[in-house]
Amino acid sequence: MTPLLEVKDLRTQFFTEDGIVSAVSGISFSLEEGETLGVVGESGCGKSVSVLSMMRLIPPPGRIVDGQVLFQGQDLLKIKDKEIREVRGNKIAMVFQDPMTSLNPYM
């Protein structure tokens, strides 16, 4: 059975005037349907950049330099821009760091 989400050796770097900053250095995990993953860590350790990379929302000068993000067997890093826009929000989403702005506390 294919995992719902499988991240393989994801690497994201920022190319700045001062040099290259490695923000995500080879994360890998697999989630089956119905499983939950909590990502915790110190400020600046790459949590947000990791998830933004998975969703292909990294702004310049950032760039995903390696890895795979397989959602339902489809590599989100290789599909066209139009296709990823159809996946985001409809099939996969993220809760940003301030959940009170993303989630309705009355529901």
Image: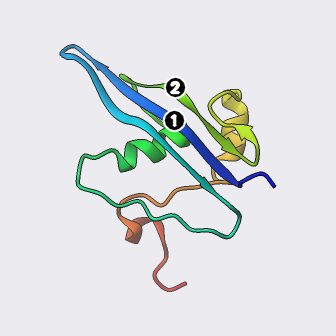
In this picture, is 57 found above or below 107? above
Instruction: Give the labeled residue for mark 2.
Output: 66
Location of the C terminus (image quadrant)? bottom right
Which quadrant of the structure image shows residue 24?
A: top left
State yes or no: discs 2 and 1 in contact (Cβ < 8 Å).
yes
**Residue drawn where x is 57% and y is 39% of the image:** 8
Q: Is residue 93 left or right of residue 82?
A: left
From this viewpoint, which residue is outermost toward the right? 1
For marks 2 and 1, the one nearer the N-term is 1
Instruction: Give the labeled residue for mark 1.
Output: 9
How far from the left and from the top, in percent, is residue 102? 46, 65
Residues 94 and 38: in front is: 38
In this picture, is 104 found above or below 27? below
Name which residue type carries label 1.
Answer: Asp
How far from the left and from the top, in percent, is residue 92? 64, 54
**Residue drawn where x is 52% and y is 56% of the image:** 94
Q: Is residue 90 left or right of residue 39?
A: right
Location of the N terminus (image quadrant)? bottom right
Please tell me how many numbered marks the rendered image carries: 2
Residues 99 and 18: in front is: 18
Q: Nearer the viewer, mark 2 or mark 1?
A: 1
Please tell me how crowded label 2 is: few (under 14), some (14-19), or many (20+) other residues with Cα within 10 Å. Answer: some
Which quadrant of the structure image shows residue 61?
A: top left
Label 2, secondary structure: give it. Answer: strand
How far from the left and from the top, in percent, is residue 65? 48, 23
What's the image's color scheme? Answer: rainbow
**Residue drawn where x is 66% and y is 39% of the image:** 85
In this picture, is 29 found above or below 20? below
How far from the left and from the top, in percent, is residue 44? 24, 46
In this picture, is 43 found above or below 69? below
From this viewpoint, which residue is outermost toward the left? 18
Label 1, secondary structure: give it. Answer: strand
